[in-house]
Image (tube, rainbow, N blue to C red):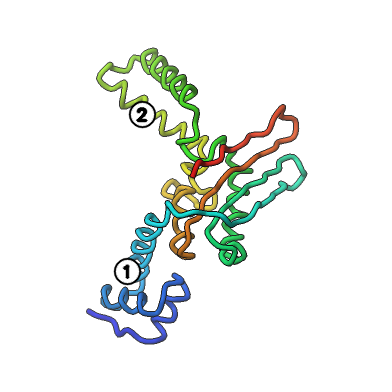
Amino acid sequence: MSQPITAELVRQLREQTGAGIMDCKMALTESDGEFERARDILRAKGLASAQKRSGRQTGEGLVESYIHPGGRIGVLLEVNCETDFVARTDQFKALAHDLALQVAGASPRWVRREDVPAALLERERAIYRDQALREGKSAERLDQIIDGRVRKFYETFCLYEQPWLRDEGSKGRQVSQVIQEVIAATRENIAVSRFVRFELGESGADEGQPDDA
């Protein structure tokens, strides 16, 4: 049964999603006035639009710093967007801060999977193949097993592939999904350019490789 689409319902949906008034009205109409369905519709449309923005130039942004209590871990991280206006918004600053916390807590080595050196990845694949053979895995399943372990490698060491630490449970989002959601909300392309993570006692810093975009 359809729910009445009131001005108050439109206002609440707009506040929660950041979408325009007409977009909210259309989503509520499409969902027959069901608030949660309307929010899902807007989110899906927003993420689709965000994918289209991924190739746009990001010449603005900020460098975020974080020092963990006790002073044993420090992070510098550069996050870029398209305009200075978005760079100064609370939402963008909050994303940059949370990304710095992610780097501090999850210790990624690269920004994206494309940044992993090819020679290192080939060496890892050879190790995984040797491990699988030693474990007695069948030859027919070798490629599948190796691909699965490579995905786990990406999830461990590539920032964009990592589980978002602020999400609880096994069904949380990846870091890249969180960034896409902010892209959808701000209507600008956003990208992590690089980061460096220091930990007291280590011989060198873990530095995320800058993207080539």
Label 1 SS: helix
Left/right placement of residue 91 relative to residue 121 reads: right
Q: Marks 1 and 2, how far apart in space?
A: 36 Å
Residue 134 rendering spot, x and y as whole percentages: 39, 12
Q: Amino acid at mark 1?
A: Arg
* Residue count near mark 2 (Cα–Cα under 10 Å), binned few <14, some 14–19, many ≥20: some
Residue 83 vs 23, above or below: the answer is above
Name the residue beneath numbered marker 2.
147
* Residue count near mark 1 (Cα–Cα under 10 Å), binned few <14, some 14–19, many ≥20: some
Residue at 43% across, 53% down: 54
Picture quadrant where residue 184 is located: bottom left
Nearer to the camera, 209 or 151: 209
Which mark is drawn over residue 37?
Answer: 1
Left/right placement of residue 144 relative to residue 1 reads: right
Q: Residue furthest left?
A: 1
Label 2 SS: helix
